[in-house]
Amino acid sequence: MIESLQSLIAQTGSRLKLQWLTPEPVTPRPLRDDHPGRARQSLIGSLNCIHPNRLQVIGHAEILYLNELGRTAYTETVKKLFTDRPTAVIFSDGIEPDPGLREAAVQSSTPLLGSALGDEELINHLRYFLTHALADRLTLHGVFIEVLGMGVLLVGDPAVGKSELALDLVARGHRLIADDAPRFARIAPETLEGTCPETLRDFLEVRGLGVLNIRAMFGEGAVVRSKTLNLIIDLQPLDHQQLQSIDRLSGSLSTCTILGVVIPRITMPVAPGRNLAILVEAAVRHQILRIRGYDAGVDFVDRQARAISLDRPDPPRSIR
């Protein structure tokens, strides 16, 4: 888990050519700040003293800006930079900080780092890495599977048939992501990415058969490491009264909020004789059409309304 500057450098330092320009801190330096005024700071970006980043990057453009400031403005800007207590200040393009910056960093106990990479390349790589490493995470019970390019989470009570349905879908050419404990991370404001814990990867437990290795049985194309969560299908054994209460036009579509992201959810009745694999495929195709702006229920109602209007035309107006 990446939570400190030191662990970030340990994992990305060699690839991004990062090196310490000041002595490495003895105690872990957190990448996040719990202080209310700094909790919403951006993780990384070019030098910004108005909306400071946790990792402030200084490249050629920032050095040119600082050098063009007068003595007083330069001193105030540098003071503001370190007063905001960033996790670290990173100099890109092989830039060496001047003595004034080094002295201010030492006085504020702020680490300085250097990289031979350009500022844009460095920021892009670190932003992508940190977005995934520090994303809010949640483990859910269910089977996460890719169906027709959509990430579908199968949920329901134990022994309802989630794993058997997943096995049927894999046999039909779809791909398994995670069984039992898929882990979801919010990597964007409206995006959840689901992955599988390393120890469970490729495995699917089916009652009566035990643990199956899907990769070994069906090949490399039957599994995938991660996928965006697009739809939740809740498998429920419903009685006659519950079935009658389902809307005949819109079905059982609802929503579920996970880590602040709203995900479409469909309650799918489980009963003998129902081909759940085909129904899941149909539900996914139906959801794809909804995303594209088409709703069959609305289309059906409009068609019936047009048919009624044709069967019962308005009475002719009287001529006076």
Image (cartoon, rainbow, N blue to C red):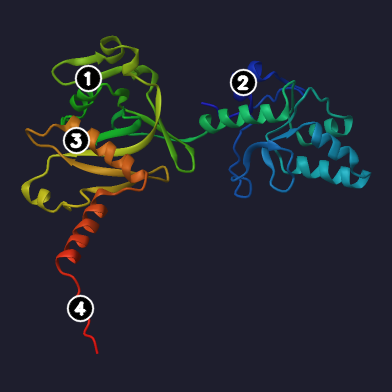
Q: Indicate left or right for 189 with 102 as reference.
A: left
Marks 2/4: CA–CA distance:
79 Å
Q: How many marks?
A: 4
Q: Amino acid at mark 4?
A: Pro
Secondary structure of the residue carrying tag 1 is helix
Q: Which residue is mark 2?
A: 12
Q: Is residue 32 above or below residue 9?
A: below
Q: Which residue is located at x 69 percent, y 18 percent? A: 17
- Give the Cα distance between marks 4 and 3: 48 Å
Of mark 2 and mark 4, the one earlier in the sequence is 2
Sequence-first disc among 3 and 1: 1
Q: Which residue is at 22% across, 56% downward?
A: 303
Q: Is residue 131 left or right of residue 21?
A: left
Residue drawn at (13%, 18%), measured in percent from left and top?
A: 208
The earlier-in-sequence mark between 1 and 2 is 2
Describe the element under mark 4 as helix, strand or loop: loop
- Classed neighbour count for the residue bearing mark 4: other residues with Cα under 10 Å, few (<14), some (14–19), many (≥20): few
